[in-house]
Amino acid sequence: MDKSIQSCLDVGDNIEVIIVNDGSVDGTSKKAHEWESRFPEKVHVVDQENAGHGGAVMAGLHAAHGLYFKVVDSDDWLDSNVMAKIMDYLESQMEIRNPTDLVIANYVYDKVLEGTHQTIRYKNVFPQGRQFGWDDIGHFKQSQYLLMHSVIYRTELLRECHLELPKHCFYVDNIFVYVPLPHVKSMYYFDLDMYHYFIGREGQSVDEKTMLSRIDQQLRITRIMIDAVQLPDGVPNPKLARYMQNYLSMMMCICSVFLRMRKSPEDEEKRRAIWEYLKTHNPGCYKAISHSIINYFTNLPHSFGRAVGLGGYHIAQKIFKFN
């Protein structure tokens, strides 16, 4: 937590750091208020009853005064040298009538137990050195989804699109980065490693055992995303519609794979139900998603299909980087 907060403060003077103590009773509030007392002009603490990751992010958004909004989890940190360059651009937008809606940069998986680092870049997708729109983007690889780590949204855009994240639920970062996209008109990309994402703590939300135990939350998030945007007709730009369809396909794949790993009749019924939900509530993209290679093979019927699906887990794990 100290490393995370210090990395935010090192970004520069024109910043506010909102620390949300989401009902923690382990000394988090005391530590947060110590930071606030040391930097009263920059640090603001929100103490609230536990509301989960989504509730904490929404509390931060409600309290934010800045032109831009960036979420940093307490396990993670920002590269101050990179952020200095990004801040120059963000500050330049303060004098512009129509500031850029979405600023994007790379992020790094810091796999501490393995001692490895993997950077997710977007230089093959986005132009550099200029503002651009969806017509200007290239092709996303399967491992290049925009995640919460890589985005900085204009604060008012998040409010104008009425972003809501459910309380007491993990994996809300998918909603955070997905739902506002049709409202984004302008973007800017930095081919710089901005965000360091810590992986390796036991019980972390992307830990395999944890994901298995929280599959109902994964299903809940996926249903919200299915309902949020009708594809492809609800997205005017075809490139963005294709990207969002691929993102939703990835979410469906993760649901299917983990339900098949649990190997119970109840979970098989849940798997069928989530696909029926997609077919009923977002029919325009059902055929394309269900017939995609990764989803076709992870949903083959009977015991053979389950075996193929579980084998596909390792492929999906490498492609989507979900743990």
Image (spheres, helix red, strand yellow):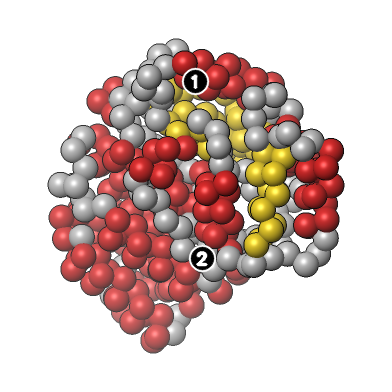
Quarter of the image for residue 78 reads: top right
Question: Which residue is drawn at the image coordinates 42% and 56% (left, top)?
Answer: 164
Q: Amino acid at mark 2?
A: Lys
Where disc 1 sits, the SS reads helix
Quarter of the image for residue 154 reads: top left
Disc 1 designates what residue? 94
Residue 264 visible within the image:
yes
Percent from the top left, x then y, of residue 319?
45, 47
Percent from the top left, x then y, of residue 97?
38, 19
Question: Which residue is drawn at the image coordinates 24% and 34% (left, top)?
Answer: 239
The dot on residue 216 is: none
Q: Is residue 171 above or below residue 116?
A: below
Residue at the extreme bottom: 265
Q: Residues within 10 Å of mark 1 (few under 14, many from 20)?
A: some
Percent from the top left, x then y, of residue 279?
19, 66
Q: Amino acid at mark 1?
A: Met
Marks 1 and 2, the one that precedes in the sequence: 1
Percent from the top left, x then y, of residue 148?
51, 44
Q: Is residue 180 above or below residue 49?
A: above
Disc 2 designates what residue? 167
Q: Residues within 10 Å of mark 2 (few under 14, many from 20)?
A: some
* Number of on-image labels: 2
